[in-house]
């Protein structure tokens, strides 16, 4: 897009009138502003104009041929006609040719085609198919319906290439291209493959971009008059803004909305994965466990769990009965055994308001601080290190800052799979000149763009990062001024790092020392360098150390406080940031005020009007281990309230975790499906899905964003916000939140007060109007701060700390019995434990089978071929799965997603924890693998 | 075949620099030369090795007609036999030859017979090219013999010619000996070229005894204009390009694809160093960091000659090895358009760019670029040696300069005729071509290849030069003159030309992509729908991105204007 200089004005003559416009304006923009009707097909707002359709041509005096107004900028003294006879004649002809090429020749067309931009322009200009052109049209049968998410109908394509730009330049997925030449030009996917066989990731950007309906949704069509509701995507921490198209209380489509995190971009889950909410197995009736149905965790290992008959375990109950049973059971345990026998797992997928009330219920109702959520399995180690060293666990710079970075260092993250839209900004940055450094055991998709790709051995992060620190320190590439004014502990830190030369660390991390030196130098000498990381860094028993080292990297080079610098731990869940901020964690009240801090304790006691426990609570895995193996009977955990979490799939060492869940005296599960965890419950409460609620969520960029209710939950299910308040009354808590949607606005305002300074400028009213506000935000009139730590850190001294780290590898190393390192993680189409996405038809169809990926070299040495069945064993358990040969995996390691109950990867992982963050080591489990004749069954869920 | 094996094989065949993305087309050629086609598995691995997505490689490979993409690695090397079906070869029976060959019992899995657009050998029509081996005056027998004897490569030309001088040729005017019609004439090697005063000019300019400014003035004051077709004054172009800050590049257009044109080939086959000297003079005076010579793929023999001539210069330490790079076209006429050529040199689809900005300012790799047709540089040495006035002194009918006319069609002696600018076609036929072929009466002619339109015999006295033909709806372009007789019909030539453009359109913009095919269809009707053709012609002329689409309707307009009876009441 032309850079518009608002200071310089340029005068030209448009249709006989003199007009002054900012220098750099395009003729199309100006003419349309002035009210001219100019058709344009290959032009798409916000994208590079290609000027190939020629529909937008105008007459520039003294130029031999007509000019594409989408591309031409105004120059001083230009004389332009947009509606002369000359222009009209050509414009009409161009539209005629497009009509012919696009199959608009009087034949019946699909609705998406009939409503398309092309059809609208043809209608506006009264284009009737001319007879001679009609007979020239070649009807094509080439409709590709191979992909469940969308249809590609080449017969109505006009080769405008908007899809190519969408795929190659915006999302940078490199799937769609233009093949052939002349009239044989056609849009292709991959190597002219069927869509489903191509590398297409179904982000849907092309569908969104297509002006003719050639790329369209398969059956249902979004009518222009549809009822639309603006909201936010429920999946990952990018927090893409979207719009639900609703008809008859059903979401029929999702469109990308221009929100600050995504600017209309979405990924396959957000765009095509919304239909889990309409799955026939949604919970609609509260359930109470039958007396004759003991809790047997073995049922979760059944192959056909998806078709399980819940009636063998539960009976339906009314809400009254179920709520009484739920609360009653928890109260009984509290009264009999004390508050330490109760705990609550809140959700990182529910709203801030729900998270806030949940932790308030646990703290005031249950009487302990044993409240936690899945952050424990995610960025707990990152947050621990960040709080320790710089006083704040949130990102210092937002994702799109990467567009300002000279260097981006990605370590232990796989953004094209787990934060797809965030990855598109990274790819855009790289195409604009940002240099990429990637450190990962796997050859990830994004590493294809890396200038330095450091393929580290699993679990050897400290060796690499400390070696980089060594290089920077010893080559004097530090930012001396920053260190002197803003950093503590430098001298000792520097001394400690001397033990970590690249030559010594190279064999440990598996990266040659020259590469370590190159990467370190590149990072340190960059004007602006930014670090992104994910689970590869955090999910280790030395995860906290890993992050301490990364913080030091940024600290000694002064990469803080400016756009394009800083630290960005990519938040996984759509509301994990918000849930932590709202206090859904055992050691802190809202806004990270320690429960052990007397001032905070007193403040909250007053604010909530209730006595509060002053001891830090237990974390997720600790809670589970206290069920069966408490230090004493008094310490035994007996009752658990779970909202929107599925620890029976997400916890490490599932045999023990499931056993623990089954041994609880009283388990209450509030969810939208009968998850694996719910199957072990005493009471099941049917809850609301994200599009069925109004509430706020906070993404990885610290944007507090509003979700609006688009459809009603299925009859019988209730809003989570209502359920929590109902339980609270049964704990004699006199909550009173009035206003629409169960008082959500009032809850927000209370939470806002509890949060303090960062939320000063964010009111419920403001969110209604602006939909998205960044925190910290000092006042209602200001925008929030994207970049933080500009002058100081939020520590007592205002300075950051450098904490030296020792090299510790994984807690348990591989050995001859368990010789391979298994890494668990995610895949593009599936979310975490699969409870949502595996019940979404399109996502399930694209990716139905659990696969374990291994390197061809390893496979060959064991005579294993692609699609073979294998048995994988660890000290914790075993499972069978199908193999996928993949060169991207490191030799000696394996990769498995944890979304599939049929091959639940966490059966194999161990519950060894990082001592500070208490996070398990999901990223390194010693396993053995062998071929098996046992064919793994994969039943999925009903969809 | 595993990925590992393919990787190894590609590294072997391609050698070279896999990370330099603009070498993509060169790399594709290596694979294509090896297999006679491009197997998809190889494209996927090549993409990976070059750090690109598969589709990016596919996009480029599928654009060029000389690359045939196949699903699997073939058992035997695939051999393509291309039979030229452009105007001059059609007049000589090219279409019949094509049809006959298609009926031959050749192993269809291995041998592919295709109709092909002008291969630049019109004076030896009809022409069939068996893989890389051109068969002049082709017949079924000669083509089959080449296939049987597995003669798939271009015969090698040797630097044994003692002398070639275009000045002597033009100065002997109508008495000029016809340039021999063969596929591999010998050429003037470096030592022979130097013997007759070669490279003294560029030496002088390099060592400062002739100042850049002097040379620049010379070219500016001469009548030398771009001889590829656009006609932009050469000296002015040098001035403009040198006014932009460096680094600057030069791209020499040896794509010679305008049907009927074969002058560049003719000169290059015999006298490569005169062109190279002109190029080096321009490089020196304008201040160019590197020269790219883009040569059409069909000129396999010339490519070898260029490589050999450049090697002579490098070995003589006259130039650094990396100063000049040769880049091969791959079967796309549109890459003769300067911005499309630049795109192709950058390793992309040959799609013309939008102007502004012009390539003199933003060209190859975003830098100011001097683009010249081969022949424009071919005359630089002699102009700088003999002076601008010498060049201007040529000319007839009040025109200035000289022109290398590629004459073909119904004349006794077709070939390159170096003649005064402004000569008429009648004069050309009579004085330089020995008259019409026996039994043929002059009917009409195409003054400028496929793009230049068609004129009737009664306009045979119009001077042929830049600017003289515009009033008649024609232009001289590359001075490719195709002579038609009463045995021919202008409407057939016009259809042939439109089908050529349909075949060669890059497909970027709507008017050309759709308009060429739509026009060609309509032109097959007995009676032309002149209104419809007029509408199509108008939108193509007014809104196409580049000259191909803009000029494509010219022949149609000429038929309507000058050969109307052919298309209004059925055949004449």
Image (spheres, coloured by chain):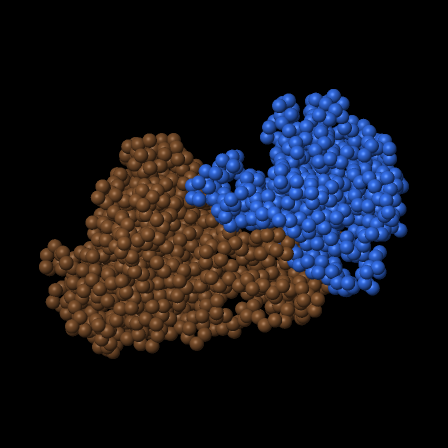
Instruction: Give residue B494's position: percent from left, percent from top.
Output: 76, 54
x 74%, y 21%: residue: B195
From the rendered image, report the letter of the chain displayed in blue: B
Q: Position of residue B14 (x, y in %)?
A: 52, 37
**Which is more toward the observer, A483 or A893?**
A893
Q: Residue at x 77, y 53 (%)?
A: B493
Q: Residue at x 72, y 40 (%)?
A: B136
Above-or-below relation of A844 to B464: below
**Location of residue B308 by image quarter:** top right
Q: Nearer the viewer, residue B160 or B283?
A: B160
Q: Quick check: can you spot residue A802?
A: no
Residue B139 x %, y %: 71, 44
Question: What residue appears at the point 25 percent right and 47 percent down from the top-left corner?
Answer: A928
Is residue A862 in view?
A: yes
- The quarter of the picture where the C terminus of chain B appears is bottom right
Report the number of discs. 0
**Figure colour of chain A:** brown
Left or right, residue B402 beside residue A169? right
């Amino acid at each position: 897009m032309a850079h518009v200089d608002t200071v310089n004005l340029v005068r030209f003559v448009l249709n006989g009138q003199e007009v002054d416009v900012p220098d750099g304006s395009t003729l199309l923009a100006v003419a349309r502003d002035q009210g001219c009707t100019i058709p344009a097909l290959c032009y798409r707002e916000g994208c590079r104009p290609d000027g190939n359709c020629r529909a937008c041509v105008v007459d520039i005096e003294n130029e031999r041929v007509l000019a594409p107004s989408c591309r031409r900028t105004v120059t001083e003294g230009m004389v332009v006609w947009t509606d002369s006879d000359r222009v009209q004649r050509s414009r009409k002809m161009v539209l005629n040719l497009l009509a012919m090429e696009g199959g608009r020749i009087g034949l019946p067309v699909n609705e998406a085609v009939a409503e398309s931009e092309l059809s609208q322009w043809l209608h506006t200009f009264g284009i009737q198919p001319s007879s001679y052109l009609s007979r020239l049209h070649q009807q094509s049968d080439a409709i590709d319906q191979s992909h469940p998410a969308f249809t590609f109908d080449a017969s109505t394509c006009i080769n405008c290439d908007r899809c190519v730009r969408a795929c190659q330049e915006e999302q940078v997925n490199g799937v769609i291209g233009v093949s052939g030449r002349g009239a044989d030009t056609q849009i292709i996917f991959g190597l002219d493959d069927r869509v489903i066989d191509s590398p297409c990731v179904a982000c849907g950007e092309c569908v969104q971009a297509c002006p003719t309906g050639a790329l369209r949704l398969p059956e249902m069509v979004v009518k222009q008059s549809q009822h639309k509701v603006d909201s936010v995507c429920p999946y990952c921490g990018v927090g893409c803004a979207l719009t639900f198209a609703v008809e008859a209380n059903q979401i029929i489509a999702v469109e990308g909305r221009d929100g600050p995190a995504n600017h209309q971009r979405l990924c396959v889950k957000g765009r095509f994965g919304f239909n889990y909410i309409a799955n026939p197995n949604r919970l609609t009736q509260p359930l109470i466990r039958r007396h004759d149905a003991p809790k047997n965790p073995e049922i979760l290992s059944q192959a056909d769990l998806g078709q399980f008959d819940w009636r063998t375990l539960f009976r339906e109950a009314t809400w009254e009965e179920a709520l009484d049973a739920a609360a009653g059971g928890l109260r009984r345990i509290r009264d009999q055994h004390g508050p330490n026998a109760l705990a609550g797992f809140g959700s990182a997928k529910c709203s801030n308001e729900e998270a806030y009330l949940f932790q308030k219920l646990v703290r005031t109702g249950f009487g302990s601080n044993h409240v936690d959520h899945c952050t424990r399995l995610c960025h707990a180690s990152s947050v621990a290190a960040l709080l320790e060293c710089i006083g704040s666990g949130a990102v210092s710079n937002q994702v799109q800052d990467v567009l300002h970075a000279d260097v981006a260092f990605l370590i232990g993250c796989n953004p094209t799979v787990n934060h797809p839209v965030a990855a598109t900004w990274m790819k855009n940055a790289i195409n604009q000149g940002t240099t990429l450094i990637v450190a990962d055991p796997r050859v990830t998709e994004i590493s294809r763009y890396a200038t330095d790709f450091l393929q580290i051995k699993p679990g050897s992060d400290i060796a690499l990062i400390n070696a980089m620190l060594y290089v920077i320190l010893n080559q004097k590439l530090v930012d001396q001024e920053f260190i002197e004014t803003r950093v503590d502990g430098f001298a000792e830190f520097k001394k400690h790092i001397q033990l970590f030369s690249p030559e010594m660390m190279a064999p440990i991390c598996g990266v040659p020392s020259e590469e370590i030196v190159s990467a370190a130098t590149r990072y340190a000498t960059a004007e602006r360098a930014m670090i992104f990381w994910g689970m590869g860094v955090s999910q280790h028993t030395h995860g906290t150390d890993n992050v301490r080292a990364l913080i030091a990297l940024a600290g000694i080079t002064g990469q803080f406080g400016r756009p394009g610098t800083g630290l960005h731990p990519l938040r996984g869940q759509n509301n994990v940031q918000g849930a932590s901020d709202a206090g859904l964690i055992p050691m802190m009240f809202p806004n990270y005020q320690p429960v052990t801090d007397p001032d905070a304790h007193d403040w909250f006691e007053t604010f909530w009007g209730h006595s509060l426990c002053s001891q830090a609570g237990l974390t997720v895995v600790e809670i589970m281990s206290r069920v069966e193996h408490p230090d004493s009977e008094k310490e035994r955990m007996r009752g658990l309230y779970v909202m929107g979490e599925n620890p029976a799939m997400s916890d490490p060492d599932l045999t023990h975790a499931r056993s623990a869940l089954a041994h609880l005296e009283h388990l209450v599960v509030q969810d939208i499906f009968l998850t694996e965890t719910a199957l072990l419950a005493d009471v099941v409460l049917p809850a609301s899905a994200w599009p069925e609620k109004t509430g706020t969520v906070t993404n990885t960029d610290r944007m507090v964003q509003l979700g609006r209710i688009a459809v009603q939950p299925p009859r019988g299910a209730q809003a989570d916000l209502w359920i929590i308040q109902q339980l609270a009354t049964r704990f004699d808590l006199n909550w009173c939140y009035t206003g629409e949607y169960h008082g959500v606005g009032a809850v927000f305002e209370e939470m806002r007060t509890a949060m303090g300074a960062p939320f000063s400028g964010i009111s419920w009213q403001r969110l209604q109007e602006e939909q998205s506000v960044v925190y910290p935000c000092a006042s209602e009139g200001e925008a929030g701060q994207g970049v933080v730590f500009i002058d100081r850190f939020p520590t007592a001294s205002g300075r950051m700390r450098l904490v030296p780290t020792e090299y510790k590898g994984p807690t348990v190393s591989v050995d001859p019995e368990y010789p391979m390192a298994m890494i668990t993680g995610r895949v593009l189409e599936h979310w975490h434990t699969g409870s949502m996405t595996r019940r979404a038809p399109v996502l399930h169809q694209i990716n139905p089978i659990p696969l374990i990926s291994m390197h061809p070299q390893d496979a060959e040495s064991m005579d294993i071929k692609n699609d073979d069945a294998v048995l994988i064993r660890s000290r914790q358990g075993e499972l069978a799965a199908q193999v996928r040969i993949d060169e991207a995996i490191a030799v000696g390691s394996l990769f498995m997603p944890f979304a599939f109950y049929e091959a639940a990867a966490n059966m194999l992982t161990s519950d060894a924890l990082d001592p500070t963050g208490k996070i398990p080591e999901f990223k390194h489990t010693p396993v053995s693998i062998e071929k098996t004749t046992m064919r793994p069954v994969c039943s999925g869920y009903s969809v | 075949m595993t990925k590992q094996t393919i990787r190894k094989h590609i590294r072997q065949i391609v050698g070279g620099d896999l990370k330099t993305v603009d070498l993509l087309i060169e790399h594709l050629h290596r694979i294509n030369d090896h297999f006679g086609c491009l197997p998809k598995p190889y494209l996927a691995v090549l993409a990976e090795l070059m750090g690109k997505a598969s589709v990016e490689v596919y996009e480029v490979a599928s654009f060029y007609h000389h690359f045939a993409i196949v699903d699997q690695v073939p058992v035997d090397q695939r051999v393509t036999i291309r039979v030229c079906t452009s105007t001059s070869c059609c007049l000589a029976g090219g279409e019949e030859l094509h049809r006959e060959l298609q009926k031959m019992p050749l192993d269809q899995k291995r041998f592919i017979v295709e109709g092909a657009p002008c291969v630049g050998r019109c004076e030896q029509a009809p022409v069939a090219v068996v893989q890389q081996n051109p068969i002049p005056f082709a017949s079924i027998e000669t083509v089959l013999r080449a296939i049987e004897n597995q003669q798939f490569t271009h015969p090698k030309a040797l630097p044994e010619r003692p002398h070639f001088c275009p000045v002597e040729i033009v100065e002997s005017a109508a008495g000029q000996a016809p340039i021999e019609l063969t596929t591999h004439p010998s050429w003037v090697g470096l030592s022979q070229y130097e013997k007759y005063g070669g490279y003294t000019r560029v030496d002088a300019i390099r060592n400062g005894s002739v100042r850049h400014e002097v040379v620049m003035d010379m070219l500016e004051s001469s009548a030398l204009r771009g001889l590829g077709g656009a006609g932009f004054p050469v000296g002015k172009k040098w001035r403009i390009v040198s006014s932009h800050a460096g680094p600057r590049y030069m791209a020499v257009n040896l794509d010679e694809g305008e049907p009927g044109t074969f002058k560049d080939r003719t000169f290059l086959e015999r006298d490569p160093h005169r062109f190279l000297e002109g190029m080096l003079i321009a490089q020196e005076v304008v201040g160019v960091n590197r020269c790219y010579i883009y040569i059409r793929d069909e000129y396999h023999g010339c490519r070898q000659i260029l490589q050999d001539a450049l090697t002579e210069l490098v070995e003589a330490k006259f130039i650094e090895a990396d100063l000049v790079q040769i880049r091969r076209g791959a079967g796309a006429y549109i890459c003769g358009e300067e911005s499309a050529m630049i795109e192709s040199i950058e390793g992309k689809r040959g799609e013309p760019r939008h102007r502004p900005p012009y390539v003199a300012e933003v060209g190859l790799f975003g830098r100011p670029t001097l683009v010249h047709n081969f022949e424009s540089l071919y005359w630089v040495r002699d102009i700088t040696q003999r002076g601008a006035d010498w060049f201007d002194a040529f000319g007839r009918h009040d025109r200035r300069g000289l022109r290398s006319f590629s004459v073909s069609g119904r004349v006794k002696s077709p070939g390159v005729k170096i003649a005064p600018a402004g000569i008429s076609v009648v004069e050309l036929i009579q004085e330089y071509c020995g008259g019409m072929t026996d039994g043929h009466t002059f009917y009409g002619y195409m003054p400028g290849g496929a793009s230049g339109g068609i004129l009737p015999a009664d306009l045979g006295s119009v001077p042929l030069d830049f600017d003289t033909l515009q009033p008649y709806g024609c232009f001289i372009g590359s001075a490719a003159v195709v002579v038609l007789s009463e045995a021919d019909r202008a409407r057939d030539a016009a259809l042939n030309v439109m089908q050529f453009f349909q075949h060669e359109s890059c497909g970027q913009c709507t008017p050309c992509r759709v308009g060429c095919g739509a026009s060609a269809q309509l032109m097959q009707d007995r009676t032309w729908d002149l209104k419809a053709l007029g509408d199509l012609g108008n939108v193509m002329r007014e809104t196409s991105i580049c000259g191909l689409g803009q000029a494509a309707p010219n022949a149609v307009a000429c038929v309507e204007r000058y050969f109307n009876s052919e298309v209004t009441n059925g055949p004449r």
